[in-house]
Image (cartoon, helix red, strand yellow):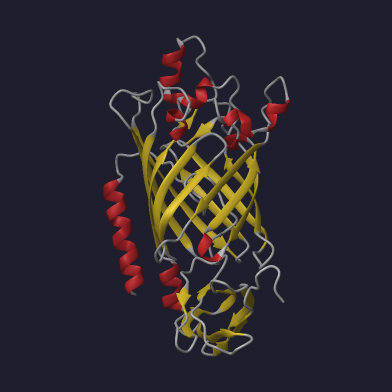
């Protein structure tokens, strides 16, 4: 139950901390503002609250310098995730993600999704607005928050965010981090001074509402779930820090940094904070007996010498463990289910196995590691 109490406490602190900010972090499982191919486990709920505030006292967002949004997500059959977000008291959107392929040693996780399922063509975290006020002076129009983010209103064409379809692939490279790459329409298409080079209209003389944009991101685990992250959502460039566990997540970020990297100097970046809490602890508490033990050893295949290895679980929101340097052994308790277990040792080829953790039983997973040979040697 301690995980449940800790998650609840962290979420309450976040509610108090961001009660005057605006949402920026992606509402489905993702990084700062991009979705990923990693989804919630089956039967797990996630409650999310995000916010951002404009940096500086004089900025293009002065009509609405701060606000916030909420979302709730649910994992289905370890294959899909559905999320309902509230941007304003009148603006709600539905997001869906479906896992097409699970991650393996040589294949990334691949997912298909659609965001902003709603009746409004133009919808952002600020709210909806189908009519553009093109009779106002440029700066006033940019500052008008009724139609979305101010910088989006400077585009020669703003692709409608409604029905933003996307494909994304995600891959974990042990201690080297997680990497994500995707394409999508709608909210993933930008026409800023930099973002215009990342969509299909770069090959055309005109802009199209169904242009395809590129988005990408990466996250690194420096210490037990804590580390930096970076992403580009097709419109904005963002960088931040996060602490994540299966039970809750806390994130801080500087977003829309392109305005200080050759973009419009009249536009300002924003500071964002986000947090979420899941019911993973509740699911585990209700199924205490539905856990098993994973144990094993790691050794040099040629000499049988024990090795100190990083044992990780690609595609699962689980932290890695270190095998004993003296014996090469490792042991931990996991919820029943199927896991990909990976062993990584510096100077050795990494190995990966798929194992099934049975309730109340111990599953043995050993790794005989092959040492890398230098080129030119036998």
**Whether residue 121 can be seen here:** no
Place residue 207 in its image quadrant: top right
The quarter of the picture where the N terminus appears is: bottom left
Q: Position of residue 144 (x, y in %)?
A: 42, 21
* Viewer-closest of 291 and 104: 104
Q: Is residue 366 above or below residue 227?
A: below
Question: Of all residues shown, which one is farthest toward the front?
Answer: 376
Quarter in which the C terminus is drawn: bottom right
Q: How many numbered marks are there?
A: 0
The one nearer the camera, 345 or 374, is 374
Instruction: Write the residue at 62% across / 34% down.
Output: 198
Residue located 41% across and 57% down the image: 227
Identify the image quadrant of residue 146. Answer: top left
Give residue 124's position: percent from left, percent from top: 50, 34
* Residue lying at 46% horizontally and 77% vertically, measured from the top left: 322
Which percent across, then down, holds residue 53? 34, 36
For the point 57% across and 88% down, the residue is 364
Q: Nearer the viewer, residue 231 or 10?
A: 231
- Give above or below for 236 relative to 241: above
Tell me: 219 left or right of 171.
Answer: left
- Residue 99 visible? The answer is yes
Q: Position of residue 48 (x, y in %)?
A: 42, 52
């Amino acid at each position: 139950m301690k995980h449940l109490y800790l998650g609840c406490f962290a979420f309450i602190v976040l509610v108090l901390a961001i009660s005057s900010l605006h949402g920026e972090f992606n509402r489905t499982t993702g990084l700062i503002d991009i979705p990923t191919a990693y989804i919630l486990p089956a039967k797990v709920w996630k409650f999310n609250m995000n916010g951002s505030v404009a940096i500086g006292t004089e900025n293009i967002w002065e009509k609405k310098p701060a606000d916030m949004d909420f979302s709730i997500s649910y994992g289905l059959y370890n294959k899909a995730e559905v999320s309902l977000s509230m941007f304003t008291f009148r603006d709600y959107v539905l997001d869906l993600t479906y896992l097409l392929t699970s991650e393996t040693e040589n294949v990334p996780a691949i997912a298909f999704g659609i965001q902003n399922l709603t009746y409004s063509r133009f919808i952002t975290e600020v709210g909806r607005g189908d009519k553009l006020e093109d009779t106002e002076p440029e700066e006033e129009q940019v500052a008008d928050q009724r139609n979305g983010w101010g910088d989006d209103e400077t585009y020669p064409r703003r692709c409608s965010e409604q029905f933003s379809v996307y494909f994304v692939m995600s891959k974990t490279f042990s201690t080297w981090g997680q990497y994500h790459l995707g394409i999508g329409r709608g909210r993933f298409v930008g026409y800023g001074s930099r973002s215009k080079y990342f969509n299909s209209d770069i090959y055309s003389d005109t802009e199209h509402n169904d242009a395809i944009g590129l988005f990408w991101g990466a996250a690194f685990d420096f210490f037990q779930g804590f580390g930096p992250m970076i992403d580009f959502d097709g419109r904005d460039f963002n960088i931040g820090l996060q602490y994540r566990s299966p039970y809750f997540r806390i994130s801080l970020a500087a977003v829309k940094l392109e305005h200080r990297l050759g973009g419009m100097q009249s536009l300002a970046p924003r500071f964002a904070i986000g947090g979420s809490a899941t019911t993973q602890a509740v699911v585990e508490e209700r199924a205490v007996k539905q856990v098993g033990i994973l144990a094993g050893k790691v050794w040099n295949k040629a000499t049988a010498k024990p090795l100190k290895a990083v044992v990780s679980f690609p595609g699962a929101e689980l932290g890695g463990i270190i095998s004993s340097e003296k014996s090469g052994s490792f042991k931990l308790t996991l919820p029943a289910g199927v896991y990909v277990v990976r062993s990584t040792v510096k100077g050795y080829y990494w190995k990966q196995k798929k194992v099934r953790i049975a309730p109340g039983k111990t599953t043995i997973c050993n790794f005989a590691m092959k040492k890398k040979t230098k080129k030119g040697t036998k």
